[in-house]
Image: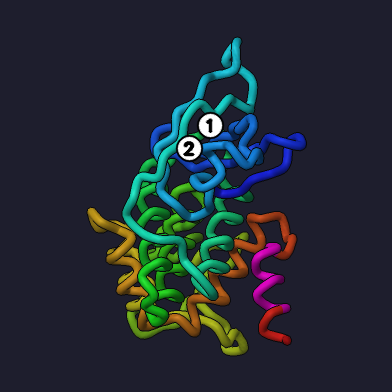
Amino acid sequence: MLHRYDWSESSLILEVFTRRHGRVALVARGAKKPSSNFRPILLPLQPLLVSYALTPGGDAEIHALKGAEWAGGHVMPTGDALLSGYYLNELLLRLVARDDPHESLFDAYASAVQVLASEHAQALPPALRAFELLLLRDIGVLPQLDLQTLTLAALEPAARYVLVPEGGLRGAGTDERHALGGAQWTLLQRALDEEAPFHATLRACAGMMGELKPLLRSLLHYHCGGAVLRTRQMMIDLQAL
């Protein structure tokens, strides 16, 4: 489950991310009642088995939840990992259209949430960067990372390159602080091309966190329409306390 909204005094609207059907909106009637079987099940960042009935006509955006059960696997993340999970959820809500299947992205999301729940704090930042890269690639806005976007020229291993929203991957200017070497970008592309791309990309990201994070943040900010993500602002506010 990505998010939940109050629909009435007793019911909820759920945004769920499914492997076969993508992002789906469901109404959970009576889910807020103390006697509802849904109450202990409908929690964020938990693997669920859900069944739902299509709205008559099949063209409505919101369908009726019929059943839900915990699929097992891991407990809900806590602390910084929980906030990071909410951040992943917000990215999916902002950038993935409803009823648009993304099976490989679903698998990457499930792997990222498992890392968040593992309590290995050192794996948290590279897991976020790996998911961001796979999300951007899956929705079609990440350029090939082993070529210069405008010229399709191969990258020089020792040269520095930046990733910019409207220009793709290009050579870095002398005044551009955040950039990666050609060898680093090529390593990321090879990881993305692996059969199990999430874990390969996570390992590749681990050695370049300082430069990669602001580059991806700029690209995500652009494709989210320029608005500051609510979870990102929450993290900033908490750090300022």
Tag 2–tag 1 contact (CB < 8 Å): yes
The Cα atoms of the two marked residues, 2 and 1, are separated by 5 Å
Q: Which residue is mark 1?
A: 99
The spot of residue 29 in percent (x, y) is 63, 30
Specify whether 105 is left or right of 218: left
Query: Taking 210 as reference, is 61 above or below it?
Result: above
Helix, strand or loop at mark 1: loop
Across and down, in percent, residue 138 comes to: 44, 48
User: Residue at the spot x=41%, y=39% of the render?
Assistant: 69
Residue 69 position (above or below residue 188): above
Give the residue at x 59% y 17%: 55
Q: Is residue 154 visible?
A: no
66 sits left or right of 14 in the view: left
Residue appearing at x 42%, y 57% in the figure: 134
Please tell me whether residue 232 belongs to the stretch shown in magenta: yes
How dense is the environment of label 2, judged by Cα within 10 Å: few (below 14), some, or many (20 and up)? some
Kind of residue at badge 2 = Gly
Viewer-nearest residue: 95 or 232: 232
Q: What span is colored magenta in the figure?
A: 229-237
Determine which of the numbered discs, if any, sits on residue 22 in the image.
Answer: 2
Q: In which quarter of the view is residue 111 placed?
A: bottom left
**Residue found at the very far left of the displayed protein:** 195
Element under disc 2: strand
Instruction: Classify mark 1: residues with Cα within 10 Å, few (<14), some (14-19) or many (20+).
Output: some
Q: Horizontal placement of 136 versus 49: left or right?
A: right
Residue 10 visible in the picture: yes
Amino acid residing under circle 1: Asp
Residue nearer the viewer, 46 or 189: 46
Q: Is 177 placed above or below 49 here?
A: below
